[in-house]
Image (cartoon, rainbow, N blue to C red):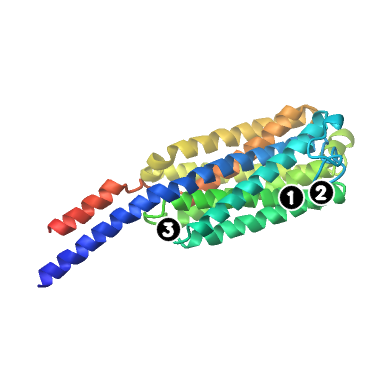
Amino acid sequence: MVFESNLLCKIIDFIHLINNQLYKSKYLTIFKRLGSHSVVALIALIVIGGATRVMEAGLACPDWPLCYGSFLPFNHMNLRVFLEWFHRLDAFLVGILILFKFTLSIILKNEIPNWLPKTYSLLLFLVIVQGSFGALTVINLLDSYTVTGHLLIAFLLLITTISINQHLENDEIEEPFIWWRLFLYVPLLLTLIQSFIGVRLSSTWSAHICLSFNKQCLILNTHKLFAYPITFSVLLIIATAIYKKSLLTENWKYLSALIFLLFSQIVLGVLSLKTNLNEPIFIIGHQLNSSLFIAILTTLIFRNPFTKKGLNHSINSQMVGINS
């Protein structure tokens, strides 16, 4: 009787496992794909925002949320107006995408993990705050602190979206080493601080004043100074992964990208200064690299560093238990 009871329990667990995996493959795959699209759209949003700032197009549309009183201002269209208009359009599409994910998670709340609708509600809140900061940048005529806050919320949106994606990918495996995550948090926080200083640098014209008149160089020097601890912390992460071979084996693609982005970021920063910030391509590339660098670091933080257990492995384990 005891044997039959244990066998029945294992069969029920086995059926529950299959059902669990089936609904995940049906619904969670949708959220994973939507999450991937969100990451691409957010990085594009940050880069286009950087291009808008570099090209001094932040006030190309004098009103908000429309541009010259219309959704598509054909009569006023030029490069600057297009950049500001397209930046707003991308922000609108990101907001619609996140709203759609939140609505879908409410509809499917009984078929997905409980934390997903709650986290999407946080994303939706951040989108509303981001839109408010976007309006304030126009109303306050590109106030430096408002522009900096606008970038901060964009990075928070990117980090939160990537963390959701990684939790969906790694919901069935062991938690990664705490110390590994702490290691990765250091360059992420330093990069965020450096990015905010960079926005202050461009929005207050401190870089141009420093390079032209050798005055107000504190912000520029601080921005350059942060490159040293970021570089050291990334090299320490690489060295740790090499020492702990399992970390290097499972994460070598991300770590390789991290090294490439780090050194290309330094090169783009040097080229920007060498050209006296007169080449927008270097500054925009600098912003793109920064966004990708933050995205890779966030992925490594929330990604489990070990191989994910597949459905076959789980089913085989259950079958062994039943057979035994």
Q: Which residue is mark 2?
A: 137
- Give the image quarter of residue 61: top right
What amino acid is labelled 1 in the image? His
Residue named by callout 1: 150
Q: Nearer the viewer, residue 56 or 183?
A: 56
**Where's residue 228, x and y in %?**
64, 43
Q: Distance of mark 2 from mark 1, alpha carbons?
A: 8 Å
Say the numbered circle drawn on residue 111: 3
Q: Position of residue 67 (x, y in %)?
A: 83, 40
The residue under label 3 is which amino acid type? Glu
Q: Is residue 264 above or below residue 295?
A: above
- Amino acid type of the residue tagged 2 in the rendering: Thr
Q: Is residue 62 above or below residue 324?
A: above
Label 3 to label 1: alpha-carbon separation = 35 Å
Q: Where is residue 123 shown, x and y percent of the image?
A: 61, 55
Foreground pick, 62 / 171:
62
